[in-house]
Amino acid sequence: MQWCVLLKYGELALKGRNRWRFEETLLRNLTNTLADLDGVRIRRRHGVLLVQGAPLPTLLERAQLVLGVALVNPAVLVKPDMAAIEKTAVELLRDKRDVTFAVRPRRRWKGFEARSQEIAIRVGDRIRTELGLKVDLTHPDVELGIEVDRYEALLYTEKLPGQGGLPVGVNGRAITLLSGGFDSPVAAYRAMRRGLSTDFIHFSGMPFTGPQSVYKAYALASQLDRFRGGGSRLWVISFGNAQRSLATAGAGKLQVLAQRRLMVRVASRLGARIGAQAVVTGDSLGQVSSQTLPNLVAVEAAAELPVLRPLLGWDKTEIVAEAERIGTAEISKLPDEDCCTLFASPLAETRADVAELEKIESRLELDPLIDDLIAAAKLHELGTQRDRTVSGATSGAASDTASGAA
């Protein structure tokens, strides 16, 4: 039997006249995901994608990562002939014991020799006769899907869940604040699942901390990169000296919020240079003192781009469960030195006064500080085909992105 993988759309199938754009993006992302496999062939067929040419377990694993795919079916490819379909159906269910089954045919090519109901009856009778299995059309243990086209028929019994959502890249570009915790990687994933292509920016406490947080951010970005098929970028900002400057300026109990305001300023400025239209954060309303509504408002007031918060209404249990599902939780559990606690006051401010924050910031030359932080950023380019680190390449990378090369 010739095995292949059938990929079916979710909400993408509901798109109207611009559906072709979503499909093209999905096809590009899928191609990138499979780029390192030899002999892979991808074909479009009536609103689904068919992939073959590599070991089935590998194809299934990769296909289940691609955002925009709702269902993944390992399927057998045969001639569009009733005899071949009946024989293959029996072979697919031969190892089943004491189960009920139902046949779910779909005749995509209306010129086929049998209608859908006749296909179901003939295949069902053959299975009952040869294997002794019972039919249950309401709650079967096994559903046999059959899809018939003009030049081929596909049979399958498994429906594996895909990631769903929209293909990465159909809804513009963003830049995501990526820490080493649970929240920000999940926020990045949820933004990507809505079609956002995102770069990542990580603020390290260096030179006052070690490189552990950078290693974690790199690992998290690499894990998230798998959902788009490569091409993600991680910008690392050495933030320790800037944090010390804020502390010296008298931030006191506003230190954490002053740091966060500076982070979104840097992310906004860098994002604008690389073509991003928004900043994504892992904020969850009320989860910690810096994420009360007044504090979120105070931080967002410093942003030069819109701030998106995919996890605003999520609680910690939901976030950790999603992190487990997408494979970032184990990385997030690793120890590191969180830059946010550097120079932070033991007192927590829950209702920040923007005027007070602006007074602290007025004691610094913010624009030169932001430009210096961006100029010293280290860029890590991730992907299945390449992975390189570039120091001090911000302006060049920005020009590449602006010209559509990124």
Image: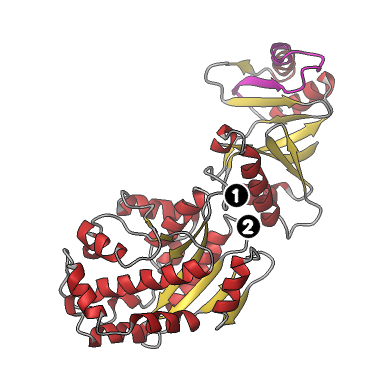
Question: Which secondary structure, mark 1?
Answer: loop
Q: Residue at x 36, y 55 (%)?
A: 309
Left/right placement of residue 291 relative to residue 201 reads: left
Q: Is residue 220 visible?
A: no
Between disc 1 and disc 2, whose residue precedes?
Answer: 1
Residue position for label 2? 229
Q: Residues within 10 Å of mark 2 (few under 14, many from 20)?
A: many
Q: Position of residue 27 (x, y in %)?
A: 68, 47
Left/right placement of residue 229 relative to residue 237 reads: right
Residue position for label 1? 66
Tally of marks: 2
| Picture quadrant of residue 84 | top right
Kindly check if marks 1 and 2 are in contact, taking CB atoms under 8 A apart as contact.
yes
In the foreground, 185 or 17? 17
Question: Which secondary structure, mark 2?
Answer: loop
Magenta residues? 97-121
Q: Position of residue 171 (x, y in %)?
A: 53, 50
Q: Residue at x 69, y 49 (%)?
A: 59
Q: CA distance from mark 1 to mark 2?
A: 7 Å
Residue 287 shows which numbered tag? none
Q: Position of residue 169 (x, y in %)?
A: 57, 53
In the foreground, 135 or 255? 255
In the foreground, 252 or 83? 252
| Picture quadrant of residue 391 | bottom right
In the foreground, 404 or 296? 404
- In the rendered view of the protein, which quadrant contains the N terminus? top right
Q: Residues within 10 Å of mark 1 (few under 14, many from 20)?
A: many
- In the rendered view of the protein, which quadrant contains the C terminus? bottom right
Left/right placement of residue 83 relative to residue 171 reads: right
Q: Residue at x 38, y 65 (%)?
A: 304
